[in-house]
Image (cartoon, rainbow, N blue to C red):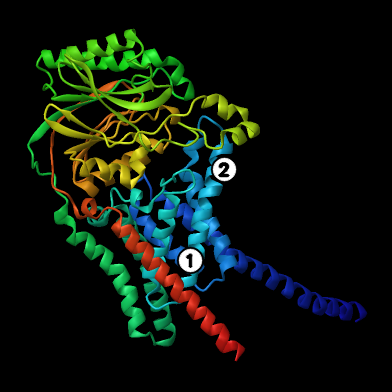
Amino acid sequence: MTVTATSVGESEQLEPRSAPAARTWAERLVRLLPAAAAALSGLLLYVSFPPRTLWWLALPAFAVFGWVLRGRGWKAALGLGYLFGLGFLLPLLVWTGVEVGPGPWLALVAIEALFIAVAGVGVAAVSKLPGWPVWAAAVWIAGEAARARAPFSGFPWGKIAFGQADGVFLPLAAVGGTPVLGFAVVLCGFGLYEAVRLAVRWRRTGEVRRAAAAVGLLSLAVPVVGAVAARPLVSDTAQDGTATVAVIQGNVPRAGLDFNSQRRAVLDYHARETERLAAEVKAGKVERPDFVLWPENSSDIDPFANPDARAVIDTAARSIGVPVSVGGVVERDGRLYNEQILWDPAKGPVDTYDKRQIQPFGEYLPLRSLIGAINGNWTAMVRQDFSRGTKPGVFTMDGAKVGLVTCYEAAFDWTVRSEVTDGAQMISVPSNNATFDRSEMTYQQLAMSRVRAVEHSRTVTVPVTSGVSAIIMPDGRITQKTGMFVADSLVQKVPLRSSQTPATRLGILPEIALVLVAAGGLGWAVAAGLRGRRAGDV
């Protein structure tokens, strides 16, 4: 009996000890759930981006993000927003470390995720307001606006709009550009959460306020209805006739940063591909183009200073017999420029465009002395800073007006719009992605060009040194594209257009309006919080 009594006593003592332990673990898991959900929803947002065509995953990603942030204090919201940003940006921007190691990649993500963390604080602040999905979506776009401008002139990569090239919301780009397109997607995501939340409440209590239900449903429906209503703005009809364009992809000897050491080979490859195309035209296999577009860095040897490079380009231009836009690196008055050069087959160079939005840490080194003290390799890689151009670039090529947007510039709203308002009937985005090997960077950038085509209702060509080069119709469809790290050319008759979409005409105004909406929501939330504290003190 003694043994039995002891056993019973021990079991009675063990139960109260194990039960609190189990409860403690359960409580820890519950506390960790929002953090895990924030990081995983950020990862889900990444999966919605190209090269995948899972654009619709952005909606559940923001629905979960809204659930995680609703009603949180600013400290918790800051941390959860940062985790969401890390989940999204770490995989999205991994290509930035392909050739230079993980340090710059991790530093870039750590900085950019701060903007998302601050946006998370704003979303949490407005989450208890009537109509909160509208305020919260506007707060997100305000965060994107800030990230597109600072630091070092901004880094818009990862704008929600750039993940929607295959989505139903894409026509909204023609209404108000990337801010309106992104706002619609985020609003729909937050609206999805609100609709689910209210449905669960109704099932539990049988009561839901009509105004709240209306907000949830409208947040889901209005973006979709708006996108359908905007479809007439998307057209590939030729308004100013057509032009037959040739896009040249010459390829590079090898991927990576050291492709620059093979500058002459890169130039020769593009000249050779142009001459091969000329032979096919002469043989009647391919229609003669009206003009030819080479990519960025297709002649990193300055043809104004090096007669041998000039002779190679001259020979290629004469073989095809039409104007060629050549991407060169040019030194003028002691300054270095990333330049597009309009090369006439008879006259030689007749016009130029200097890249205006140059890439920090790639084309120039901010805080050079400080960076050099931390890591001398950076200053060795960027020995001389590129200078910025000051004027839009629109080449008149066989009567067609072609706007030039060089590579990194395609991520910035203002650089693309300026070419269209300056008269461009089509857009070319000459690029060089060889530095980033076979990473997703190429496909992310290609999606940007598709969004720009719809935003401004223009044909967009994308000549790239190593791929993927493409021809994109004004409705965002890719009609031809190359593989990666192959020599190839694309020839196609494309529509020329001169009408301006609402997005082109309005420019920055939709973004300003959304920032003001965000400011209004935040001001309301702060005022409501202060009134609540005063009432509590009384």
Circles 2, 1 touching at the beta carbon (< 8 Å): no
Horizontal side of 234 relative to 220 (left or right) equals: left
Question: Where residue 50 appears, x then y in whole percent?
Answer: 36, 44
Q: Considering depth in this image, is 9 or 192 the residue closer to the camera? A: 192
Image location (x, y in percent) of residue 438: 42, 31
The picture quadrant where one finds residue 233 is bottom left
Q: Which mark is residue 107?
A: 2
Q: Position of residue 534 (x, y in %)?
A: 57, 86
Q: Residue at x 47, y 63 (%)?
A: 65
Q: Is residue 51 left or right of residue 395?
A: right
Q: Amino acid at mark 2?
A: Ala
Q: CA distance from mark 2 to mark 1?
A: 24 Å
Residue 394 is marked as none
* Quarter of the rendering containing residue 442: top left
Q: Residues within 10 Å of mark 1 (few under 14, many from 20)?
A: many
- Between discs 2 and 1, the one toward the N terminus: 2
Is residue 40 at all visible to an observer of this figure? no
Residue at 89% across, 78% down = 6
Decide if residue 525 is on the left or right side of residue 292.
right
Q: Is residue 95 above or below residue 336?
A: below
**SS of the residue under disc 1:** helix
Residue at (48% x, 52% y) in the render: 43
What is the three-letter code of the residue carrying label 1?
Answer: Gly
Between 381 and 452, the residue placed more toward the observer is: 381
Residue behind mark 1: 122
> Is residue 473 something one can see in this rendering?
yes
Q: Is residue 205 above or below residue 48?
A: below
Judge the density around disc 2: few (<14), some (14-19), many (≥20) Cα neighbours within 10 Å: few
Considering every residue shown, the one lying at the far right of the view is: 2
